[in-house]
Amino acid sequence: LTQFIRFIKDRFNRPIEYLEIGLGHAGMFRAMCEHVPIDLAITIDDCRVMEFAKARNRNLAALDDRGQRYTLTVSRTTPHVISRVLFNRCVDVAFVDGCHTYNGVRSDGLAVLSEMVAGGIIAFHDSIFYGEKGGVAQFIQEIEWGMVPGLRVVTKFEQVYGIVVCEVFKP
């Protein structure tokens, strides 16, 4: 987590527009909002995992207490929802940690890709947590093989759960 945040701070020397798919405990969302200059912070989550509710509420309350402005959209992630939530604004950094099936990761990744600026970053969480056969790992492999136009892997932080950082480019 620390390495990823340092990577983002080093890459962007200005406030960013940040989108997080899949809020979970809201720990990453809180860390990004507290440590990276953010102009716009948006998260989309269906909030169905009730075991995360207490931690999620505590982390969001901490952001409220420090006056951090953010938008939480409670919904399944679809290209239409992402487009509607962003109101024609492009994103600098997206953190994808929603559905971990291959189809879910691919759908979220491609939906986010269409809303990104060239040079933007899409990070995929849990790249090693579910193993080589996990949905995240399978989608990352497709990116590495050049099967996802407009996206290339630039670095991997593979401690604990794994974060794969990809750069958006216009083919």
Image (tube, rainbow, N blue to C red):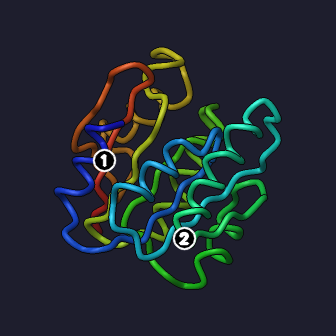
Residue shown at 69%/60% (left/top)?
78
Front position in the image: 51 or 67: 67
Assign a secondary structure to mark 2.
loop
Residue shown at 68%/77% (left/top)?
84
Residue shown at 45%/57% (left/top)?
94
Q: What is the quadrant of residue 160 in the picture?
A: top left
Q: Quadrant of the C terminus?
A: bottom left
User: What is the x, y in percent for residue 133?
Assistant: 52, 17
- Relative to 166, 32 lies left or right: right
In the rendered image of this protein, does residue 87 appear above or below residue 1? below
Which amino acid, by three-letter code, is at mark 2? Gly
Q: Which residue is mark 2?
A: 67
The disc at residue 5 is 1
Front position in the image: 84 or 138: 84
Which mark is first along the chain, 1 or 2? 1
Which amino acid, by three-letter code, is at mark 1? Ile
